[in-house]
Amino acid sequence: MTDSRPDAAPLLARALGLVPYRDALALQERAVEARATGASGMIDTLFLLEHPPVLTAGRGTGEGSVRASDAALAGAGLEVVPVSRGGDVTWHGPGQLVGYLVCDVGARGRDLHAFLRGIEQGLIDTLADFGLESHRSAGRTGVWMGDDKIASIGIAVRKWVTYHGFALNVRPSLAHFGLIHPCGLRGIRMTTMAERLGAACPSWDAVLGTASARMAGALGYAGLATASSLALPAGAHWSEAAAPSAHTWEAA
């Protein structure tokens, strides 16, 4: 874990619930502009949310990374959305915790490599708190458990402000990952916290709180902002907050 600098500011964590992907992308665009221009009250922020099922294709998406035909994707109700983050194609959906980091790395030495390694460490620390041993894999950004991948990471930068971030598989169905080569990697398998822990898989609130605190620490922030609240905005909701078996939908 990275120790916070003496002059470090806190990180604001905001829980948003289940948000359509394009709506979340628009939110990030506004937040990046506000952070880059020094808008009053805008500090480095971690947005925590879920998405309805969607595939996102980063700048590095290669030919053949999407294995399914257009007809199969349509049958599964999946849109492929091109995005500006690094990396290849990935899936987002219910039961996966997505964290979008809108952070001024211009004020943090402009070291994107260190920022990515900090995100990895925050996820490794989060999983360790729930008894799961995970690790990095040389040359492959993300977090792994043995040969299985449990978290994906991809960021973009504009005016030295980051956006996009990470996706941690808490308790999603893995069915839709079979339609792609996750992150463009052939022959890999995805895993989840629920798969590894079974009935001992923590509650959604427990993962939110731990991931927020661990991410702030690993990235060198002075904890979480006192204004941070993981309570959902009025009208927002998570896809579920109970047992891992709540997810029963499968790919067509």
Image (cartoon, helix red, strand yellow):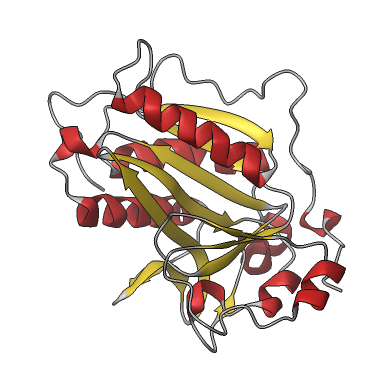
Dividing the picture into quarters, in which one does residue 54 lie? bottom right
Position above or below: 92 against 150: above
- Residue 103 position, x and y percent, is 33, 35
Q: Position of residue 109 (x, y in %)?
A: 12, 41
Q: Is residue 37 left or right of residue 64?
A: left
Q: Nearer the viewer, residue 211 or 160?
A: 160
Residue 172 figure quarter: bottom right
Q: Is residue 224 visible?
A: no
Quick check: 131 above or below 1? below
Q: Residue furthest bottom?
A: 187
Could you say where residue 2 lies in the image, as x and y percent from the top left?
A: 22, 45
Residue at image position (34%, 25%) is 35
Q: Is residue 76 above or below residue 29?
A: below
Query: Is 47 in front, or is 245?
Result: 47
The residue lying toward the viewer, choosing from 245 and 162, is 162
Task: Tell me what residue is drawn at x 28 percent, y 42 percent.
Answer: 219
Residue at 48% across / 70% down in the picture? 88
**Left or right relative to 70: residue 170:** left
Residue 231 at x, y percent in the picture: 63, 22
Q: Nearer the viewer, residue 192 or 141?
A: 141
- Looking at the image, residue 131 sits to the left or right of residue 32; the answer is right
Quarter-of-image position of residue 49? top right
Numbered circles on residues, count: 0
Whether residue 65 is visible here, answered yes or no, is yes
- In the rendered image, the vertical position of residue 103 relative to residue 41, given as above or below: below
Q: Is residue 205 left or right of residue 154?
A: right
Q: Quadrant of the C terminus?
A: bottom right
